[in-house]
Amino acid sequence: MLGGKTAVVTGGSGDLGGAMARQLTAQGAHVVIWDIVPPEQDNPADYRQVDVRDRAAVDEAIASLPQVDIVCANAGIVDAQPFLELSAENWQNHLDINLSGCFHTCQSAARRMVADGTQGRIILTSSWVAQIPWPEITAYTVSKAGVNMLVKQMARELAAHGIRVNAIAPGIVAAGLAGRQLREEPQYAARVAKVIPLGAPGSPEDIAAAVVYLASPQTNYMTGSILTLDGGCSLFQFDA
């Protein structure tokens, strides 16, 4: 389905990014992982050390590729702090990686696609909490809300070039950023136990399958959309 395509996955050494890389590879794409740490050995993708906060490094990495067809702007962090204790450094780190990192990656890739005449796919990783406030992760939720509008702005302006821009919005996934919180933050795990109508966290494979869908010809008429995969977390919760 994706044979002959080149895909970039940022944050590709993590659980979500690794699953994206594996599933895109299984569909025939040549996948290049960007991260600041190498992936596990079982990941079939090529690896390049790229910090998405560094625009010069991003531009250099994009220019080095033979072609750019699919970009998954997935690199991100979450570091919980209550609002009254939220440090300026924590706030800035989230904006730099989760939002500005997406901007650098997507703008650089889009410029390359336009120059090459490629009607590519740009897929960002948002979150269900981009629209639903969740305690103690203000910097994260705000950064992901920014991602949602970045998707819509890019989709509006890049449509004339045939470039589709969409996002996935995972819910609580038992891996990656949320997986660490489930293991390390008891207050987070207690909340999670109450808020998933389908009864269990999602998996990286669930999320990666949605990325493959957005990268596929099945979504030729889809741009500017936020595809939510949250097990119903964003639904209003009733006690009974």
Image: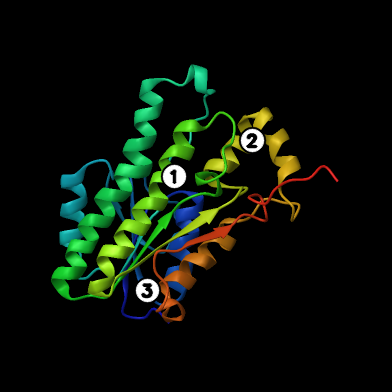
Up/down of 107 relative to 182, above or below = below
**Mark 3 secondary-structure assignment:** loop
Residue at screen point 63% across, 50% down: 234
Label 1, label 3: how far apart the Cα atoms are = 27 Å
Nearer the viewer's eye, disc 1 or disc 3?
Answer: 1
Which is nearer the N-term, disc 2 or disc 1?
A: 1
Query: What residue is disc 1 on?
Result: 144
Up/down of 120 relative to 217, above or below = above
Which is nearer the N-term, disc 2 or disc 3?
A: 3
Query: What residue is disc 2 on?
Result: 183
Q: Which of these two is toward me, 202 or 237?
A: 237
x and y, in percent, of residue 220 in the image:
40, 79
Label 2, label 3: how far apart the Cα atoms are = 33 Å
Query: What residue is disc 3 on?
Result: 29
Q: Are marks 2 and 1 in contact (CB under 8 Å)?
A: no
- Judge left or right: residue 65 versus residue 19: left
Residue at screen point 31% across, 37% down: 96
